[in-house]
Image: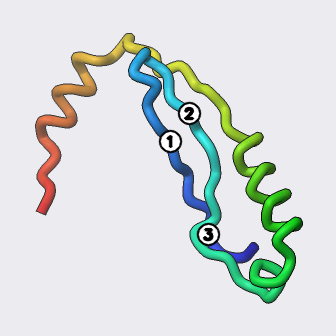
């Protein structure tokens, strides 16, 4: 793998998220020709997932900051 790693997360809807690193692109012939290796590498990505608790101590302050963000 080469390039930048993207940090990805998904909500568990209980105050925690699943967090994992996801390469943003793949290159090399091995990805096209070695399906067993691709499966192994994919499993490594899945196994690297972590569940992180998101503290709610500063929800009010976060809401104040978020309300000031302008998306253009």
Q: Pointer 3: what residue?
A: 4
- Residue 15 vs residue 58, the one in the foreground: 15
Separation of disc 1 and disc 3 at Cα? 16 Å
Q: Pointer 2: what residue?
A: 18
- Left or right: where does residue 58 sit relative to residue 41? left
Q: Is residue 62 positioned above or below 15 on the image?
A: below
Badge 1 density bin: few <14, some 14–19, many ≥20, Cα 10 Å: some
The residue drawn where x is 80% and y is 88% is 29
The residue drawn where x is 43% and y is 15% is 14
Q: Position of residue 57 (x, y in %)?
A: 38, 11
Residue lying farthest bottom?
29
Q: Secondary structure at mark 3?
A: loop
Badge 2 density bin: few <14, some 14–19, many ≥20, Cα 10 Å: some
- Say which of marks 1 and 3 sits in front: 1
Q: Position of residue 52 (x, y in %)?
A: 58, 25
Q: Position of residue 67 (x, y in %)?
A: 12, 35
Q: Which mark is residue 30?
A: none
Q: Secondary structure at mark 1?
A: strand
Q: Secondary structure at mark 2?
A: strand
The residue drawn where x is 61% and y is 27% is 51
Residue contact at pointers 2 and 1, CB within 8 angstroms? yes
Separation of disc 2 and disc 1 at Cα? 5 Å
Q: Quadrant of the N terminus?
A: bottom right
Q: Which mark is residue 9?
A: 1
């Amino acid at each position: 793998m080469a390039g930048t790693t993207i940090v990805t997360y998904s909500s568990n809807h209980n105050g925690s998220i699943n967090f994992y690193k996801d390469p943003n692109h793949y290159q090399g012939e091995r990805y096209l020709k070695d399906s067993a290796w691709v499966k192994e590498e994919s499993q490594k990505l899945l196994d690297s997932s972590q569940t992180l608790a998101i503290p709610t101590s500063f929800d009010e302050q976060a809401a104040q900051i978020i309300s000031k963000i302008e998306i253009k």
